Image (tube, rainbow, N blue to C red):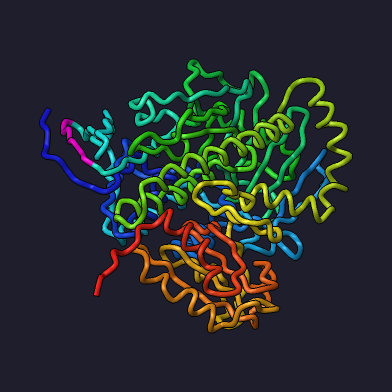
Amino acid sequence: MTTSSNAEVDVLVVGAGPSGLATALAVARYGLRVRVVDHKDGPVEQARATMVHARTLEYLDHFGLADHAMAQGTPITHVQVYDQNRGSAELPLAGRGIEGRTRFPCALSLPQSKFEATLVTALAEYGVSVDWNTRLEDVTDHGHNVGATVRRGAQREQVVARRLVGADGARSTVRRCLGIAFNGSTYPQIGLLADVALDARLPPNRLRLTLTRGGFVGVVPIGDGTYRLFGAVPPGFGPTPSWSETTHDPYAQLARDRLRKWWREYFQADGELRDVVWASLFRFHSCIADRFSTGNVFLVGDAAHIHNPAGGQGLNLGVGDATNLAWKLALVSSGEAKVSILRSYETERRRVARTIMHNTDRGFKLELGGNAAVMWIRMRLLRRLVRPLTRLPLVRKIVFRILSQTWISYRGSPAVAAGPATGSLRAGDRAPHTALATTSGSILDVLRQSGYQLLMFEGISPTASLGELGRIGAELPERYLSPVRVHVIPRAETAAHETYGAHHTRVVLVRPDGHIALIGEPRGPRDIEPLITHLDGILLTRPRVLT
């Protein structure tokens, strides 16, 4: 076995799944040297994860990839719940009153294979390709950099990176090398994913759930005339695993005759299963790493947390990790931000992961729990309540917010400013979409630019003039090594003012990941001091030139 000379990169990403590719792309956009390695032969070919929710589409929009993703996938605008072959309820994911603060009021059925291909193509535009068939063997954090041993066939290489991101799944080698525990539990149920061709009349743009005695089973279109079937299979329906390893990888195939039996007996839909593209059994787990970072090494996606598939949250949670971490890595690595900002990654994302795990655990137990009390609730109470509950606008809005991950906020994080409670929008919240009349676009178009963005709203009832706002923001672009771009929003943009609660003059500082860092209501130049104080704590200032 031979050894090559050292390679120097800013960020080494281990794992080329959705979270690893998203991390690499976000870092590469800042001009950093990034390398991606993965032990697989190439990108996944199966659909695997299929649901891309609104918050992830907003991240893709920030990369300029949302339109491409929408064209590749199938928008899911409704969830239909069936009971004994009759429609019990229909829950819209789009439309008036559901969620008006996102550009993407839907879920998108997009196979993981297409999702990954989109990111791989975008990475290539920055001169970055994935090193397939390259396995990580060891990681050592030296303090000033990270040493990694990778192997491709008989060739072993020592890679030196300023920082390393472990995106290598539930069986993470990065996590093992660092000695980080991965604690949680495994559910007794056996899950099934299958991509099939159906001769069935199913309405388009719908995710169909069928309530059975054993729980919910579902079907959703994934494009090209195929559908994803998912759910838990009854005991004895398929082979049980001979190992108890914590992974969401499939452990066995299901025979076609058994899959057809499952379709006929559980889905209660008119039509036949015509062909099987892929069908596998897997186990459900709920685990989280004790730490998401240590020194110069960070964990994202399944390397940091895995949970049951209720609500299709997994891929989206991993991409959220990547987007939160990448801008911090980029600004610190380029010498534009203080190293201390990296500590906020674990503070913010571990709290989010635990919340989603708690919610999916509760939903999973209601969907598939086998004890008598849960079965009674599901078969008796839920059947009676699901229709009236899903008609309530508040319920519809709550369901969308939970599924879409637009609820995620970093309030209280050291990377956002503490401030007075002024309306429903707070520092730490996601910056919402709102239409801009002057450009016929969205305020999210403004946020596509790299770095911090300062939105300066004149105010419906101004307490500062546009001239004063200009003077307030004039020094920011030249004060910091990282760009802080200033955008004045005149009061003629009434929709934007209403969305951002700008009854009076208001400044909203937005982080590079689209979350609000600070909200203030200045009346003059002196009132900008809290903004300066916050940014001084995050970004490095330019040295002053004495004259």
For the view shown, which residue lies furthest in the front direction? 547
Residue 109 is a magenta residue: no
Query: Does residue 108 appear in this view?
Result: no
Residue 536 in percent (x, y) is at: 42, 58
Residue at 57 percent across and 77 percent down: it is 489
Say which residue appears at 63% left-offset and 51% top-offset.
Answer: 404
Helix, strand or loop: magenta stretch: strand
Residue 25 x, y percent position in the rendering: 37, 54
- From the viewer's side, name the closer residue of 210 and 443: 443
Q: Position of residue 319 (x, y in %)?
A: 48, 48
- Residue located 30% across and 51% down the image: 333
**Boundaries of the magenta span:** 154-160
Position of residue 194 relative to residue 246, above or below, is: below
Q: Is residue 21 visible?
A: yes
Quadrant the C terminus occupies:
bottom left
View extreme (top): residue: 242
Please state, as top left, top right, bottom left or bottom right, where the N terminus lies in the image: top left
